[in-house]
Each structure stands twice: as C-alpha cells, then as structure tokens.
Amino acid sequence: MELTLNHYLVLSTLLFAIGLIGVMRRKNLLMLFFATEILLNAVNVGMAAISHYRGDYTGQMFAFFIIAIAASEVAVGLGLLIVWYKRTGKIDLDQMTSMRG
Amino acid sequence: MFEVVAFYLFAALTIVMFTITVMTQQALYALTAMAAGMIFISAFFFILGADFLGAIQIIVYTGAVMSLYAFGMMFFDTTRDVVEKRNNPRFVVVLGGLAAVLIVLIVLAPIVTTDLNAHYPIDVSVGNSQAIGMVLFTKYLVPFEVAAVMLLVAMISGIVLAGKKMDKSLTLMADEEIALMHASSHHTPEEGGH
C-alpha cells in the first residue's frame, strides 16, 4: 500500500473541518484563536503534500508565508485581546455587540 | 511501509489532539493539546520531505506561538470553565464538515483535470533547506521582504497594545489623561524616568 496525495488531502479536509467546528461553536475569543490556528495548519499540510507529489517548491513557499502571517496574527490578536480584557474583564464574543442600536 | 504506518499514527494523533482543543472546556487543556497537535503536524512535513518546513513548524508554532499564547493566558481567568452557548451542536458539526468539503471542491475543481507543470521543480541534487533558500531568495524575494515588514509591524503593535507598563496603558487612557501625564513629567523632571 502506497501513500497518495489523496491521503493527505483527506487528512487536510478533516483537520479543516475540526477547525471550522471550533470556529463555529466557540464563544470565548481565545478559543476562537486556537481554532483559527488549526485551520491554518490544516491548509499547510495540504500545501506541503501538493508540493511533494507535484514536484514543485511553490507549495512549501506558500506554507512558509502562511506561518509568517499566523505568527503576526497571533501577536496583534493577543495584544488586542489583552486590551479588551483590561477594559471589560471579559473576552466573550457575545459581549462585544457594542454596535447594537 | 513505515511511511504508511507513520502517516496513520500521526493522522490519528493529530485529529485526536485538535478535537480535544476544539471540544474541551478548560483553556489550559486546549493550549497543551494544540501544542502537541502542532508537533504532530510537523511529522507530516518530515514524511513529505519538507525538512525545513517541519523545523520551522516546530520552532515557530510550538516555540513562539504557543509560548505567546501561554503568556497571554496569564492575563485571563483560565481556571474557570469556558462557557459556550450551544443551541444545536449537530447542526454545527454537519455545517463545518460540509463547508470544508465544499472549499476543497471549489479549489480543486478547476485544476483537477488539467495537467499542471512545476514552476520551480524539486531538485534532488541539493538538500531541502538549500533548495528552499535558493527559491526563496531568488523567486520569492519581494514577498519575503513584505513578510518581514509585516512581522515588524506586528511586533510594534504587540508592544504598543500589551506594553511594559501594565498598570497604565496608553490605549486605554483618554487624551486628557495622556496630556496630563506628559505635562507632569515635563514640569518635574527629577521625579520621572527613574
């Protein structure tokens, strides 16, 4: 039995589904960030697999840039989260509906 | 053969870890399970021959991102259970799986029949790290520099938002308070700064 590209794509889809479930069910913003990290990692697995099976470095390059973007997203997001927590004492998504009239 | 065994082992471990991350009520469990899942993800990169990517995955995700989350969690009340509003969990699961499959289909549909040819074909005569460096610094130099600037901006914004003076934050103060603080520090220079 040999591993094919489809194995990795199915795995990538499964991980992406787990991340999407997390994004949809979480109301705590920290947990929501965790779920987005899972989404980005699922995409990275697919990128690396396509890079390997198509014999092209482009997939790995995109995975690198995705990792860089994820790192900066965490830095900015956690900073904003800390400011919000110091201001309100909560990081729940439901309490952020400040634009309701 | 070992490749197949390793793939299924790490696939099962990764799925279990990320499921714990998504489903648990404890923030600390979620953090540790995700750190484990990130390390297991790097195993796929090593199986696929992307050695440099696997090393970067361990260094950046479990080294930088996870420790950043751990530091961030010191600010939050992580001991209490995370309360989630759940009106219909099965609906969410079905919708999540459906959306993931749909995204894969949308991305794959235009290219699945066409015969793609490689822009930067894999060179077996040099190692993965060397080849990555050559492609990154010749073909992807501009995106690399843009990513560097973006990381710099993220670093500055992180310092500004969660700065060192934790008792008073410039982002939380009104303009008058900031002006007052500046004025007092200018009038009495022997008190400020030390």
Image (cartoon, coloured by chain):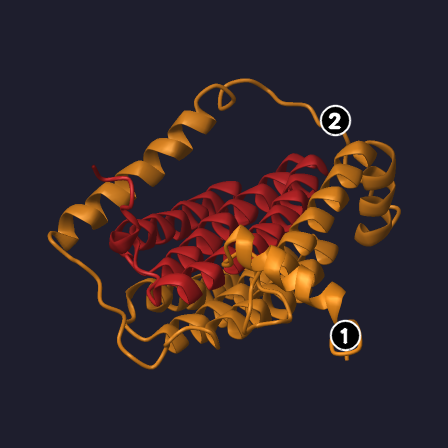
- Picture colour for chain A: red
Q: Secondary structure at mark 2?
A: loop
Q: Where B109 falls versus B181 (above or below)?
A: above
Residue highlighted by disc 1: B193
Asked which quadrant contains residue A53, the reply is top right
Q: Is residue B44 visible?
A: no
Q: Judge the density around disc 2: few (<14), some (14-19), many (≥20) Cα neighbours within 10 Å.
A: few
The residue lying toward the viewer, choosing from A12 and A70, is: A70
Residue B81 location in percent, x, y? 26, 76
Task: Name which residue type carries label 1.
Answer: Gly
Q: Secondary structure at mark 1?
A: loop
Going 20% across and 37% down the picture, which residue do you hit?
A: A101
Residue highlighted by disc 2: B119
Q: Where B191 falls versus B180 (above or below)?
A: below
- Picture colour for chain B: orange
Image-based side of B6 in relation to B135, left or right: left
Going 69% across and 43% down the picture, which residue do you hit?
A: B150
Q: CA distance from mark 1 to mark 2?
A: 57 Å
Going 70% across and 59% down the picture, which residue do you hit?
A: B56
Q: Which image quarter holds the N terminus of chain B?
A: bottom right
Residue A3 location in percent, x, y? 52, 50
The residue lying toward the viewer, choosing from A50 and A61, is: A61
Q: Chain of mark 1?
A: B
Q: How many marks?
A: 2
Q: Judge the density around disc 1: few (<14), some (14-19), many (≥20) Cα neighbours within 10 Å.
A: few
Q: Chain of mark 2?
A: B
